[in-house]
Image (tube, helix red, strand yellow):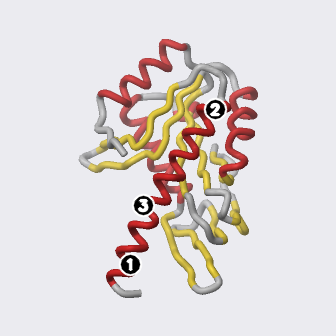
């Protein structure tokens, strides 16, 4: 792959990522009918290092941290791998383990807003064109779900209805304000 091809592919992946994030936000707004706040592309700092969180959904049962992966290939990986594989018949592409990536995001959220981590849930959402072939989870203590976009709403509704209420409307609003206004925010 030439340098120009790599740049074009990188630009394509960024655009695909933006589309994936918008699809997730739209699905949530259209289908989650309980009081919630949502914010995207939040930059959080810890020890002079930054991380960007794709989507944070704040609900009465806690915070859902959503990592968007709008990929098209066949996906292989486990919670313990450093990288996962997006496989196409003509090539393999390796990418950062999104479960570990979201664990990192949650660590930054906990550091910044001092919320009990047991009330923070990790979702990794791949586009519907991705085939989740071999996704293995060896750590049963992780509060993480890996899914395609088409399964997002059902998973959210199931989790929201099966968990205890831990945040009041005022706490939801305060967390939203803290994340939206007191931290750097990218406008995409």
Q: Nearer the N terminus, badge 1 or badge 3?
A: 1
* Position of the N terminus by quadrant: bottom left
Q: Secondary structure at mark 3?
A: helix
Q: Secondary structure at mark 2?
A: helix
Q: Which residue is mark 2?
A: 30
9 horizontally vs 67: left or right:
left
Instruction: Report the Cα–Cα distance between label 2 and label 3.
Output: 24 Å
Q: Which residue is mark 3?
A: 14
171 horizontally vs 61: left or right:
left
Q: Which residue is mark 1?
A: 6
- Could you say where residue 147 lies in the image, as x and y percent from the top left? 68, 53
Q: Secondary structure at mark 1?
A: helix
The residue positioned 39% from the left and 81% from the top of the image is 5
Camera-side residue: 123 or 18?
Answer: 18
The residue positioned 57% from the left and 28% from the top of the image is 62
**Marks 1 and 2: in contact by CB < 8 Å?**
no
């Amino acid at each position: 792959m030439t340098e120009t091809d790599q740049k074009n592919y990188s630009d394509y992946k960024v655009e695909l990522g933006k589309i994936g994030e918008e699809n997730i936000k739209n699905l949530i707004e259209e289908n989650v009918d309980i009081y919630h706040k949502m914010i995207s592309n939040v930059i959080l700092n810890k020890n002079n290092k930054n991380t960007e969180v794709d989507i944070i959904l704040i609900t009465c049962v806690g915070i859902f941290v959503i990592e968007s992966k709008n990929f098209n290939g066949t996906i292989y990986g486990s919670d313990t791998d450093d990288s996962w594989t997006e496989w196409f018949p003509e090539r393999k592409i390796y990418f950062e383990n999104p479960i570990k990536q979201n664990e990192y995001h949650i660590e930054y959220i906990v550091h910044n807003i001092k919320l009990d981590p047991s009330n923070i849930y990790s979702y990794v959402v791949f586009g519907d064109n991705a085939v989740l072939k071999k996704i293995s989870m060896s750590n049963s203590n992780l509060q993480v779900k890996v899914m395609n976009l088409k399964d997002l709403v059902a998973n959210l509704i199931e989790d929201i209805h099966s968990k205890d209420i831990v945040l009041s409307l005022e706490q939801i609003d305060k967390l939203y304000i803290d994340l939206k206004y007191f931290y750097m925010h990218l406008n995409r």
